[in-house]
């Protein structure tokens, strides 16, 4: 079974631009979560999507948004990039039981975003 | 929200040595996972262990949910074990809550 895939793997942007990152979950997984990793703040939760609906949201400004498609693939968008948005963005997928609760999360390789 | 503390923050071992990494959490959890982050940033699943004990080769983990801690044991360490080990928990409650990560333990294994 293929793992979680993320594209692109590396990205360089300038301040003020916007960026879209993509995540394809493991087949059969309907929950997709996004995390930001920086040296200063560690790993922080951005948002989670399940069945095309945002189910949870972390404490990030509105410049960070996401969506999920009917095939469970997800995208996240960052508008008006700032230098502080430079980070490793990780996507995770998990299988969701009939009760709606998630199980073990599996992570993709990440997208390393550099904002100049 | 739930707090996750990992210790020690840094660990240097000679190849072949054993080690124990600790994860303390401040509230009840539905889910606890241990990850190894490789030099390229990929988080590798080690254990999904909300309670009990599991073993996988040279690695084993124990979670004592009632006392709110988990331990990761690495035996006969190898240089390829180097990297950062993260503990992450999902707080108990209604519905789903996101994984909350500790700050990690950076392990360096020296030949």
Image (spheres, helix red, strand yellow):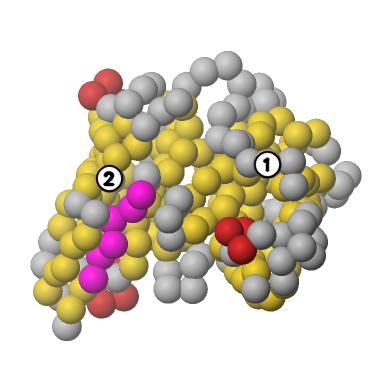
Residue for badge 1: A61
Q: Secondary structure at mark 2?
A: strand
In this rendered view, identify the residue nearer to me: A24 or B1.
B1
In this rendering, position of residue A108 left or right of residue B38: right
Q: Is residue A40 visible?
A: yes
B106 drawn magenta: yes
Q: Are marks 2 and 1 on the same chain?
A: no
The image shows residue A112 at horizontal and vertical percentages of 60, 69
A83 drawn magenta: no
* 10 Å crowding of disc 1: few (<14), some (14-19), many (20+): few
Residue for badge 2: B6
The image shows residue B24 at horizontal and vertical percentages of 27, 35
**Which secondary structure type mostly characterizes the magenta part of the structure?**
strand
* 10 Å crowding of disc 2: few (<14), some (14-19), many (20+): many
In this rendered view, identify the residue nearer to me: A100 or B110.
B110
Q: Residue at x 35, y 37 (%)?
A: B4
In terms of image quadrants, where is residue B109? bottom left
Quadrant in which the N terminus of chain A is drawn: bottom right
The image shows residue B73 at horizontal and vertical percentages of 21, 52
Q: Residue furthest toward the right?
A: A70
B101 versus A2 height, above or below: above
The boundaries of the magenta stretch are B103-108
Q: Residue at x 25, y 65 (%)?
A: B107
Q: Is residue A2 visible?
A: no
């Amino acid at each position: 079974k293929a793992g979680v895939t993320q594209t692109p793997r590396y990205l360089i942007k300038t301040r003020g631009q916007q960026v879209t990152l993509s995540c394809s979950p493991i087949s059969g997984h309907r929950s997709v979560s996004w995390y930001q990793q920086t040296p200063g703040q560690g790993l922080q939760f951005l948002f989670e999507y399940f069945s095309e609906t945002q189910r949870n949201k972390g404490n990030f400004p509105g410049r960070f948004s996401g969506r999920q498609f009917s095939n469970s693939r997800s995208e996240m968008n960052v508008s008006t990039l700032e230098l502080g948005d430079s980070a490793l963005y990780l996507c995770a997928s998990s299988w969701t039981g009939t009760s709606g609760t998630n199980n073990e999360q599996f992570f993709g390789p990440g997208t390393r975003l550099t904002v100049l | 929200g739930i707090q996750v503390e990992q210790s020690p923050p840094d660990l240097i071992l000679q190849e072949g040595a054993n080690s124990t990494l600790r994860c303390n959490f401040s509230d009840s959890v539905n889910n606890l996972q241990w990850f190894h982050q490789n030099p390229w940033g990929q988080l590798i699943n080690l254990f999904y262990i909300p309670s009990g004990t599991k073993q996988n080769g040279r690695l084993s983990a124990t979670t004592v949910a009632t006392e709110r801690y988990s331990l990761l044991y690495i035996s006969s360490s190898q240089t390829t074990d180097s990297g950062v080990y993260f503990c992450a928990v999902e707080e108990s409650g209604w519905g789903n809550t996101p994984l909350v990560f500790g700050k990690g333990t950076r392990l360096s294994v020296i030949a």
